[in-house]
Image (cartoon, grey):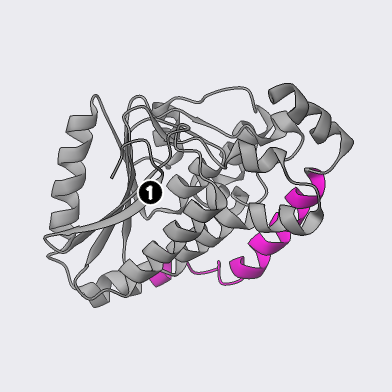
Amino acid sequence: MSEQQPYVKLEIENQVGYIEFFHPAHNSLPGNILAELAQTITDAGNNDDIKVIVLKSGGDRTFCAGASFNELININDEATGKVFFSGFANVINAMRKCPKFIIGRVQGKTVGGGVGLASATDYCMATKFAAIKLSELNIGIGPFVVGPAVQRKLGLSGMSQIAIDANTFYPADWAKQKGLFTQVFETTEELDEAVKAFAQNLCSYNPEAMKEMKTMFWKGTEDWDALLAERAIISGRLVLSEFTKETLKRFK
């Protein structure tokens, strides 16, 4: 497997399912990779050989730069827009419905949809390089699809702060104070050791108890299939606006 080819892969080690995604453009994810990621999470949730899931990305520097910019630029109708913005919605809903705890391993910066993925994990650990940004307002849309997941972790105050201040990377320690990250490590090596040890420890617990706990933690989100679809329609409409089209031209 070439390091420069996009991929989603699942590796099982001592009952821990490690799901890794990668794209050479700073782990910005096109629709086909997002669909594969959602399916892989669903499959891992149904796999009896897996007790705990770790979500991670390939590469050293960026956890996830959000959705594919090339696909975003080429949206010309609302139906295509809805499908595009449903990509991260489908992954977040797969994570929400997964009956197993998902541990996030965030090694570097994360933007837009990537913040949504980190927020949808059940327990998220990071390095000090894992600054976060919601940049959607910069191009004339907003973090509508990932908003519910981000707000659930950061609270309305924290989510609105980074959504409105769309130019700023907020440091990992800020994200830890707000409850997104549970621990922040100096190096990726320390992060990986901690994630592995934590996941192995969880494997010693009763799977039924963990499943019931996950259901409890996500109570109140049962409407997210419909909610995130509605949010995708809003983004799909806004991306066709003159403002956004003109803004995107400058990024080409």
Crowd class of label 1 (few under 14; some 14 to 19; many from 20; radius 10 Å):
many
Q: Residue at x 61, y 48 (%)?
A: 147
Amino acid type, residue under disc 1 in the picture: Tyr
Q: Inspect the magenta stretch and tell me whether residue 99 lies in it.
A: no
**Which region is colored magenta?**
215-238
Residue 183 vertical placement versus 86 (above, below)? above
In the rendered picture of this protein, how many numbered marks are placed on residues?
Answer: 1
Residue 60 vertical placement versus 145 (above, below)? above
Q: Residue at x 75, y 22 (%)?
A: 250
Q: Which of 238 and 221 lies nearest the eye of the viewer?
A: 238
Query: Where residue 213 sits: x, y (%)?
Result: 34, 69
Q: Which of 142 and 156 lies nearest the eye of the viewer?
A: 142
- Principal secondary structure, stretch drawn in magenta: helix
Q: Residue furthest right?
A: 242
Query: Where residue 188 sits: x, y (%)?
Result: 24, 30
Q: Can you tell which quarter of the image residue 174 is in? A: top left
Q: Inspect the magenta stretch and tell me whether residue 237 lies in it.
A: yes
Quadrant assignment for the C terminus? top right
Residue 169 vertical placement versus 207 (above, below)? above
Residue 8 falls left or right of residue 200: right
Q: Residue at x 37, y 30 (%)?
A: 108
Residue behind mark 1: 7
Q: Can you tell which quarter of the image residue 71 is in? A: top right
Query: Where residue 86 sits: x, y (%)?
Result: 62, 58
Quadrant assignment for the N terminus? top left
Q: Which of 97 and 23 lies nearest the eye of the viewer?
A: 23
Q: Residue at x 49, y 42 (%)?
A: 114
Q: Residue furthest front?
A: 2
Residue 64 falls left or right of residue 192: right
Report helix, strand or loop for mark 1.
strand
